[in-house]
Amino acid sequence: MSELEPIDDGVRRYRPGLVILLSALVLAGAAWFIFQAVASKQGTTEEETPVIEIAKIEEEIRAPAPPPPPPSIHPLEGKRRLFLADGCRYRFHELTFTREFSEQHDFPGAILREDDPCLWNFVGVPEKEDVYRIFCADPNYPDLHEKNLTYTRVFDDGLPQDTLPPYLTLREDDPCEWKVRELSEKDQYELYCLSGSEPFTGKSLGWVAEQEELLHDDITTTLGENGNPSWFILEEDQKPTFPRRASHLIVMPRGEVEGLAESREDFEENGIEIFRAIIETADDEFTRVAAKLSHVELVKAIRDTDPVIDHKNFPALANFSLPDLTDLPEPDPLFPLIIPLKVALHPHLIHELTIQNTDFWKNTWENLDDFQSLLDESDVADGRVYQGEKFTYIFVSWEP
């Protein structure tokens, strides 16, 4: 055999040794363990994280909501403005004060006045619900901010006069507590003095137009006068909303009216124009005569715009519903008596109202000089319904 001839069949085979086989097995095992460890860590992260988050969410959902804070026993604390809310002549006058007040003392006196804004600081009395001390908070008089609203009796020869209404004054040596009672109307309250002694303790904050020994002709605040007047208690940047202006006056009789039969005869002979109203305000006095206007047309015109037609004293249309205005019985030719005012007028500004039959100046039906005691302040009346002894007076807003 030459050297060029192979010693075998030419097929080459690799036969690894024992050491190499063992090393390969060790490497494969190590790789398997590493893979299992990495897979285990990744699986734990993906599975455990959402379980923890869901548990937290469920815990938050099942936890009871915190209870709401209890309502304050002093909801009016802070700086406020006070306006008279009932009456007519002095309605919407603001509670303010004046330094030059009474000849009896030199304390600032609390009065009612227009166009004189004044702030009062309501400070709640601890553990007494709706009970406050009321301090002056007028920014123009910082020297009075420690003085609170209280009262001073009227003295005669050194003796207190319990039959005379006391003065309301600003003093710092006489703390006074006021119980504030909320009425059904929004922002209307009654205030009662809880301090002092009889006969004035527990009396309500009121007002009086004439009080003795005043240096000026002021409308003074006092205790226990004009019933239990209501007050607007408003934020410092607020003023009460005036009732709407009136364009016409409706007059309806109440019960038996003396001279009414004669007036009907005069009306049949001379027409509706013999009846007139004389209206006096603080700045003016004017006369308006009745007009031959249809009450039905008036109701049709204002039934969707003026709530006063829902008032119990508004003249009914023979008990028919408002939409049904056909086939009505013959109306009373005299009443409702309708008087065009020919001016947009706030009724609460009227001081005096006189209704007359001018035929030979035969009679004066009624003279009203005390409107504040006759005003109906309900939401429907809106300060525009007045009850006299002989007649009911209803002011409406109508533009025919």
Image (tube, rainbow, N blue to C red):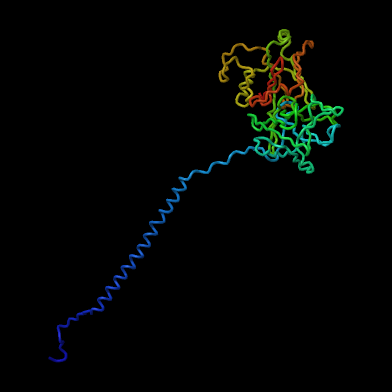
335 versus 12 height, above or below: above
Q: Which quarter of the figure has residue 392? A: top right
Relative to 215, is 300 on the left or the right?
left
Q: Please name the residue shown 23% across and 78% down the image.
A: 18
Q: Please name the residue shown 58% across and 20% down the image.
A: 322
What is the tally of numbered marks visible in this picture? 0
Assign the N terminus to one quadrant of the image. Answer: bottom left
4 versus 338 height, above or below: below
Q: Residue furthest bottom?
A: 2
Which residue is at the front of the view, 90 or 285?
Answer: 90
Q: Which quarter of the figure has residue 168? A: top right
Assign the C terminus to one quadrant of the image. Answer: top right
Which residue is at the front of the view, 275 or 41?
Answer: 41
Relative to 73, is 199 on the left or the right?
right
Coordinates of residue 6 in the picture (x, y in percent): 16, 87
Coordinates of residue 383 in the picture (x, y in percent): 68, 25
Coordinates of residue 17 in the picture (x, y in percent): 23, 80
115 versus 344 height, above or below: below
Q: Which quarter of the figure has residue 268? A: top right
Coordinates of residue 235 in the picture (x, y in percent): 68, 38
Which residue is at the front of the view, 178 or 30?
Answer: 178
